[in-house]
Amino acid sequence: MASPPDKSKTIKLERYNSYLRRLHSTKILNSSSKLLFRATLLIVLVLILFFTLNYPPLSDNIPNHAHLHHHHNFLSTAFFTSAGGAAWEKQVRHSSTPKRRNGLSVLVTGAAGFVGSHCSLALKKRGDGVLGLDNFNSYYDPTLKRARQKLLLKHEIFIAEGDLNDASLLRKLFDVVPFTHILHLAAQAGVRYAMQNPQSYVSSNIGGFVNLLEVAKAANPQPAIVWASSSSVYGLKHSIYGPWGRPDMAYFFFTKDILQGKPIDVYQTQDDKQVARDFTYIDDVVKGCLGALDTAEKSTGSGGKKKGPAQLRVYNLGNTSPVPVVNLVSILEGLLSRKAKKHVIKMPRNGDVPYTHANVTLAYKDFGYKPSTDLATGLRKFVKWYVNYYGIQTSLKKGSAISGEHPEGSA
Ligand SMILES: NC(=O)c1ccc[n+]([C@@H]2O[C@H](COP(=O)([O-])OP(=O)(O)OC[C@H]3O[C@@H](n4cnc5c(N)ncnc54)[C@H](O)[C@@H]3O)[C@@H](O)[C@H]2O)c1
Ligand SMILES: *[C@@H]1O[C@H](CO)[C@@H](O)[C@H](O)[C@H]1NC(C)=O
């Protein structure tokens, strides 16, 4: 006769099983918590290292730019761009060290801008050290500024991200680098936008500029300073144009609108005259800026050789041959193989001006400034860059007017 199953034994076995299960899960828990602990420790160590290298200096001056958005990429770029860190300093030094003997070491403000990016590349190309500064504001598409930054980085030019009004950042830059020159091109550009946002002009072009001058004054050695004004201060207007140009300028948005079949506004003066502009190609302006840098004397203030006030010279850089805007439109029509929908209207009284003409006599005398690019040649280079950059499939025939140029344009 089979004995009934021993109940107590079954219970014991069950208990034993559950004990084993518990033991097992505790082990798993134990080993996983050990792993967790180690991983946490590792992460903490990495973070400590990260913040030691990149601890940002205390800023005593928070730039007032609430009207323009700034884009920061945490982690992806912070490691290299947050001011004051060892990695940041290394980039700053490397970028600003000249590669040729007696080369300049230039702080280029507005280096992510149109003129600034071209000048930076030209300086680097001839062996000078270049460090950029830019706040990447969104006055126009910041994607374009980032693309210029990428191009500069390819040529080992680093742009420190910050505002002209940030005195501690500027001081830090001058602590790290004995700049010989400043090429000051960071500004709130444009004329019409002043109607909308006059404060941005005061903040960058006056406040930021004075801040830069103050820091440069205190720097040792004192750098020579070259800065761009605008023919607008004469009540005139000439538009610099070329590859990597500014989307807020007529030749740029005319190209866009013509390609999209949108009508374009072509201005006439109040007395029905044609509006003409002294269009200057970017390469000619770059030559002028480099010429001004090369002939700029050191400030003769406290740090200079000579006593007395610093020497100030004013150069006009233009093309000296104003072209009617309607001619610009017909050149574009030819290059794009599209007819523009011209909408001729009277020029609004909004700070815009009917005609311009530069007197380049002094620039020629001092550094041989002589513009050499005519509008058709320059626009061909611009359109070539434009269709490339925006990946536009045009009906442009192979071997047409715009083919055969380097996609980076003049850069
Ligand atoms: N492009 C032209 O046709 C033209 C003609 C005559 C004079 N200029 C002058 O040349 C200079 C540069 O013009 P651009 O066409 O290269 O303009 P841009 O707008 O392309 O470049 C200016 C750059 O400065 C940066 N910036 C602006 N405010 C700043 C601030 N507070 N701190 C740090 N960075 C700041 C902007 O982000 C921008 O990248 C301006 O002074 C402009 O008036 C330009
Ligand atoms: C052009 O500039 C030069 C040098 O500054 C000056 O001597 C000359 O008078 C100017 N010409 C005109 C037409 O204003």
Image (cartoon, helix red, strand yellow):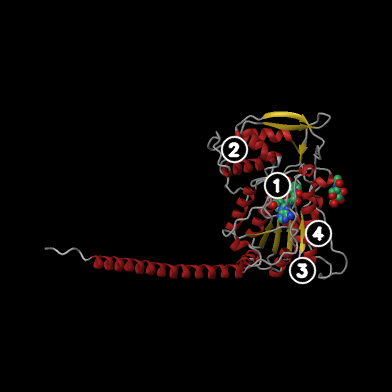
Q: Which residue is mark 2?
A: 401
Residue appearing at x 80%, y 34% in the figure:
348
Q: CA distance from mark 4 to mark 3?
A: 14 Å
Q: x, y (%) of residue 9? A: 24, 68
- Report if the beta carbon of the residue with label 3 is closer than 8 angstroms to ligand 1: no
Q: Quadrant of the N terminus?
A: bottom left
Could you classify mark 2 by the number of other residues whose Cα lies within 10 Å: few (under 14), some (14-19), or many (20 or more)?
Answer: some
Q: Secondary structure under badge 1? A: loop
Label 1 or label 3, whichever comes before in sequence order: 1
Q: Amino acid at mark 3?
A: Ala
The image shows residue 51 at horizontal and vertical percentages of 60, 68
Q: Is mark 1 within 8 Å of ligand 1?
A: yes
Report if the beta carbon of the residue with label 2 is closer than 8 angstroms to ligand 1: no
Residue of label 1: 139
- Please tell me which residue is depicted at 77% across the width and 61% down the height of the picture: 212
Q: Amino acid at mark 4?
A: Val
Mark toward the viewer: 2 or 3: 3
Q: Secondary structure at mark 3?
A: loop
Observer-side mark, 2 or 1, equals 1
295, above or below 193, in the image: below
Mark 2 residue type: Ala
Q: CA distance from mark 4 to mark 1?
A: 21 Å
- Toward the right, the furthest residue is 308
Q: Which residue is mark 3?
A: 219
Residue depth check, mark 4 versus mark 2: number of the one nearer the observer:
4
